[in-house]
């Protein structure tokens, strides 16, 4: 009886330790794990009420030619988080700056989920970034060869794109932007992806 009890205690302890390890992994590597899980299980958002237009089929955001501060853009800049992508093939003008201000407000409005999103600005490598953007530390500013914009499955002129944690472009927004609609879509998608991740973790733990 004692040996059986000891075995049961050991199993219970082992299970608790596994749960702790999973919890720690989610805490420190949550965005990466989320991207991997969603990609591995082929999850697609089941959102019937949305303000943006779904891109069917979703396509990866080609990052091979993108440059960030003169260096190739790191993959983790477009993986692991929901990314609001600003596409400006003619450079960032006043309209671009106004839109960046709107999406910055959306980002802040996510509150405790701010770390699950990022903003990305893509302009041609022949353009310069406005000096006023230097103070925006939460905006990832990258350049692309002009041909990059021709490879997109959408018309980049006057369009905002949402990229999921797996690096797939899943939704586009025509301008002028309805900022509240973008915020609601992000909140729904984040809730849905978190539930999917939790279900997957529960299966692993079982």
Image: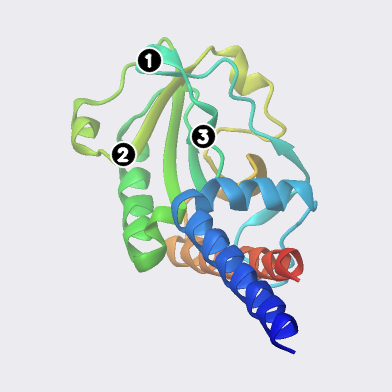
Residue placed furthest toward the front:
2
Residue placed furthest toward the bottom:
1
Label 2 sits on a secondary structure element that is: helix
Q: Quadrant of residue 4?
A: bottom right
Mark 1 neighbour density, 10 Å: few (under 14) some (14–19) many (20 or more): some
Distance from the alpha carbon under mark 3 to that under mark 2: 25 Å
Q: Which residue is mark 3?
A: 76
Q: Which residue is mark 2?
A: 97
Q: Earlier in the sequence, mark 3 or mark 1?
A: 3
Q: Position of residue 92 (x, y in %)?
A: 36, 28
Label 1 sits on a secondary structure element that is: loop
Q: Position of residue 64 (x, y in %)?
A: 60, 18
Q: Earlier in the sequence, mark 3 or mark 2?
A: 3
Q: Position of residue 88 (x, y in %)?
A: 47, 29
Q: Is residue 81 visible?
A: no
Depth check: give the residue in front, 99 or 26. 26
Label annotation for residue 31 = none
Residue at horizontal 37 percent and vertical 28 percent from the top? 141
Q: Is residue 37 visible?
A: yes
**Which colouring convention does the figure follow?**
rainbow
When the figure is inspected, residue 82 is found, relative to residue 62, above or below; the finding is: below
Q: Position of residue 157 (x, y in %)?
A: 55, 33
Label annotation for residue 127 = 1
Distance from the alpha carbon under mark 3 to that under mark 1: 24 Å
Residue at horizontal 49 percent and vertical 46 percent from the top? 84
Mark 2 neighbour density, 10 Å: few (under 14) some (14–19) many (20 or more): few
Depth check: give the residue in front, 162 or 72. 72
Label 3 sits on a secondary structure element that is: helix
Q: Nearer the viewer, mark 3 or mark 2?
A: 3
Q: Quadrant of the C terminus?
A: bottom right
Whether residues under marks 3 and 1 lie with C-beta atoms below 8 angstroms apart, the answer is: no
């Amino acid at each position: 009886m004692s040996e059986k009890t000891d075995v049961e205690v050991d199993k219970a302890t082992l299970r608790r330790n596994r749960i702790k390890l999973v919890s720690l992994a989610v805490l420190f590597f949550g965005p990466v794990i989320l991207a991997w899980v969603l990609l591995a299980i082929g999850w697609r958002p089941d959102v019937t009420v949305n303000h943006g237009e779904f891109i069917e089929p979703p396509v990866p955001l080609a990052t091979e030619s993108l440059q960030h501060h003169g260096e190739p853009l790191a993959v983790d800049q477009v993986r692991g988080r929901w990314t609001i992508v600003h596409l400006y093939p003619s450079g960032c003008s006043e309209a671009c700056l106004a839109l960046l201000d709107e999406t910055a407000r959306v980002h802040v409005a996510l509150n405790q989920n701010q770390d699950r999103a990022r903003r990305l600005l893509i302009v041609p490598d022949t353009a310069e970034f406005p000096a006023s953007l230097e103070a925006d530390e939460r905006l990832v500013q990258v350049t692309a060869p002009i041909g990059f914009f021709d490879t997109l499955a959408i018309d980049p002129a006057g369009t905002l794109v949402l990229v999921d944690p797996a690096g797939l472009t899943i939704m586009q927004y025509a301008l002028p932007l309805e900022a509240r609609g973008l915020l609601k879509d992000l909140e729904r998608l984040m809730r849905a992806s978190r539930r999917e991740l939790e279900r997957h973790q529960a299966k692993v733990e079982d």
